[in-house]
Amino acid sequence: MEQGAGAEAGVGDSPLRPDGTLKVTGEFAYSSDMWHEDMLWGCTLRSPHAHAEIVSIDIGEALAQAGVYAVLTYDDLPTEVKNYGLEIQDTPVLAHGRVRHHGEPVALVAADHPETARRAAAKIKVEYRELPVVHNEESALAADAPLLHEGRADHHSPHVPHPNIVHRQPIVRGDAKAAAERAEAIVTGEYEVGMQDQAFLGPESGLAVPAEDGGVDLYIATQWLHADLRQIAPVLGLPEEKVRMTLSGVGGAFGGREDLSMQIHACLLALVTGKPVKIVYNRFESFFGHVHRHPAKLWYEHGATRDGKLTHMRCRIVLDGGAYASSSPAVVGNAASLSVGPYVVDDVEIEALALYTNNPPCGAMRGFGAVQACFAYEAQMDKLAAELGMDPVELRQKNAMSQGTVMPTGQTVDSPAPVAELLRRVKAMPLPMEAQWENVGGEPDVRALPGGLSNTTHGEGVVRGVGYAVGIKNVGFSEGFDDYSTARVRLQVVGGEPVAMVHTAMAEVGQGGVTVHAQIARTELGVARVNIQPADTRVGSAGSTSASRQTYVTGGAVKYVCELVREQVLERGRRKFGTYHPAWATAELLLEGGKVVTDGGEVLASLADVLGDEPVEAEDEWRHRPTEPFDLRTGQGFGHVQYSFAAHRAVVEVDTELGLVKVVELACAQDVGKAMNPQAVVGQIQGGTTQGLGLAVMEEIVVDPGAKVRNPSFTDYLIPTILDTPTIPVDVLELADEHAPYGLRGAGEAPTLSSTPAVVAAIRAATGKALRRVPVRPEHIVEV
């Protein structure tokens, strides 16, 4: 993917995405578009039960069907390694003995046509004996609760009191009980967040091609090639070098592709049949094939003096992790450490935990534990403001953290934290016009009303509300995880012009990393043409495209390796031309416009002349400063490398008689440290804001008390369309973080936090309802 650009395409500019035109014209090749001669199609048989013993499996009829090449069950797995997992290897490749959630994979089929594969899968006869279902905290932690993972008790730390707890993180700082006695106002609340889906539009898909050396080449849509590789190779019984992975076109991710889906299944079928195997999930299967956002129940208590100064905070956060661990331990760490929000509170008592249940597995989704906490603590701030008779923005500003604030974990915030300023800016934005449904002639335009496109109202009972929220999100991997990225950069002359080649394993999932990497290379190497190599496992790990980390960490790696290349180029120039001009030895030298120049602007040589026919190349890893695990008793520790902040103001119109909501505007102010690509930054903020809007008023995977998913389709799981998405004005601050490359701050997740509570706060303002649960439904607004 080569990008040619002028001088105005470096860091701080907004060049076009190299894949943008292809995507909007429909020419971009996504993973589901891949094709191979003599290709077979894979299909997965999934459990109809949430918790059941597998009594028997009969594959005879399926295997006998014409066109079927293979039918695999747990017994056909080639090695003793039968499980995988991001942090805890507790997820079976195929169910064995019992299934633990609705939709768990039980068997695989490979056939010469996708419909043949589906029909064969339907002929597999599985006899189940249903078991008691663990579906909530009470059933998970009961004394006689079924243990969903026997043997896990031996692996738990002493602070975890029950084997059905995946992970527990307390945080204790100061004396919350003593501080509560000094409080002049105390508010408590119980809150609930539903299960949200990432709802990426590109379904899980991939193509596995068996190789002559006994290995396999996998072309896959994923978020982290090397984490996939680490989990896939042991199950296949192959060394990692024989599992070669290449990123194919990814149609969105948002955390849902961080865990494996069909990767191992496709490789197994390809190796067994000796033929390429393609698997593409339909939308129904996609809802079962990836993790979701953890649903949560949260209890909070806040105290304050009469003038609004917070005295203490206590909370308990219970996350439903579902049947397997996925990234639940890290989500718990985030939820606990960020549960106070962007506020100064010296005395806290916090507990966060994630449970094993028979509900669908939950893991990474944009916001990663901080979303759930933000909804609760921002509802509390509004509740406390009402109790004190204060303006809710003023209360937040009075308690806003700033650079130098000590977090509940004992970590000092050592970069800008402009929380009060973000709130000031978002509040100062002009409000949208009242009664904006009126057109120029003064007649109502019902299309702009809540539910107006369905002709359900002509404006009766419509009330406007305004609400505010602000949030804090960590950036990068935390709690001592070795967060690094690898980059390979090559500079050579092609057609008389210097061209930079950048090779990383970064998964481009739509976030625009391929654009930013080219901007960095142009800035550091002074070239116009940059070639971004396809991401694959021929280069070292770039980590996951998650945690708002890729521009920081892989961008940092590209910057660092470009600097190594630049030094090699300058050293070669000194050897070649140093005797002809003293500036080679005495001046500060830069690469600009394809030339070597002094800091005074004097041109010493062209890059083409310096390089000649011999390219310059470097490869290395780059790490941010280390973090450390949180203490498992007190929660103290330098757990996060960076924090990001965003504030929202929501304006809504609510039909209080019908319970319908229209979000008129969602204004946002966010500090990004350095806008590497200003247009892309605004796009990230608007996209994250829209996902938060979805959680506020429409998005939820509905799981019944039997732990069965009731709405696994876009017919019944609703996401915001262009008709639901309001105007989203954005005010971007650039307050540099001295610890980060270019001073940048990860920008992708923070707006997802505060948009949800801002919308709900606005609905509360319009209706007077408490609204302690998201998404808000019509029946929550209108008593029935």
Image (cartoon, rainbow, N blue to C red):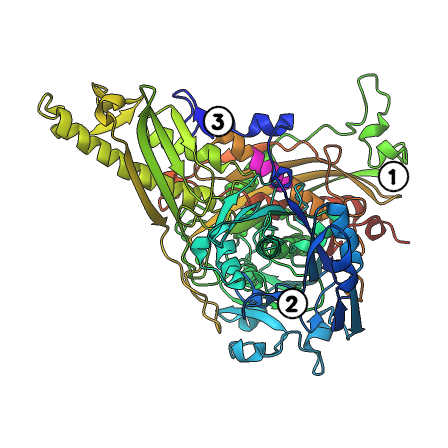
The residue drawn where x is 12% and y is 29% is 585
Highlighted range, magenta:
683-689
Mark 3 crowd level (few <14, some 14–19, many ≥20, 10 Å Cα): some
Mark 3 falls on what kind of element?
A: loop
Q: Nearer the viewer, mark 3 or mark 1?
A: 3
Among numbered discs 3 and 2, the one appearing first in the sequence? 3
Mark 2 falls on what kind of element?
A: helix
Examine the rendered structure and indicate whether residue 477 appears above or below residue 634. above
The residue drawn where x is 76% and y is 58% is 64
The residue drawn where x is 22% and y is 35% is 568
Q: Quadrant of residue 755?
A: top right
What is the x, y in percent for residue 577? 14, 24
Q: Which mark is residue 707?
A: none
The residue carrying mark 2 is 74
- What amino acid type should be assigned to the residue bearing mark 3? Ser
Task: Give the spatial CA distance, label 2 vs label 1.
Answer: 59 Å
**Position of residue 774 in the picture relative to residue 446 (left or right):** left
The residue carrying mark 3 is 14
Among numbered discs 3 and 1, the one appearing first in the sequence? 3
Mark 2 crowd level (few <14, some 14–19, many ≥20, 10 Å Cα): some
The residue carrying mark 1 is 461
Task: Give the spatial CA distance, label 3 vs label 2.
Answer: 50 Å
**Position of residue 558 in the picture relative to residue 392 (left or right):** left
What is the x, y in percent for residue 683? 57, 34
- What amino acid type should be assigned to the residue bearing mark 2? Tyr
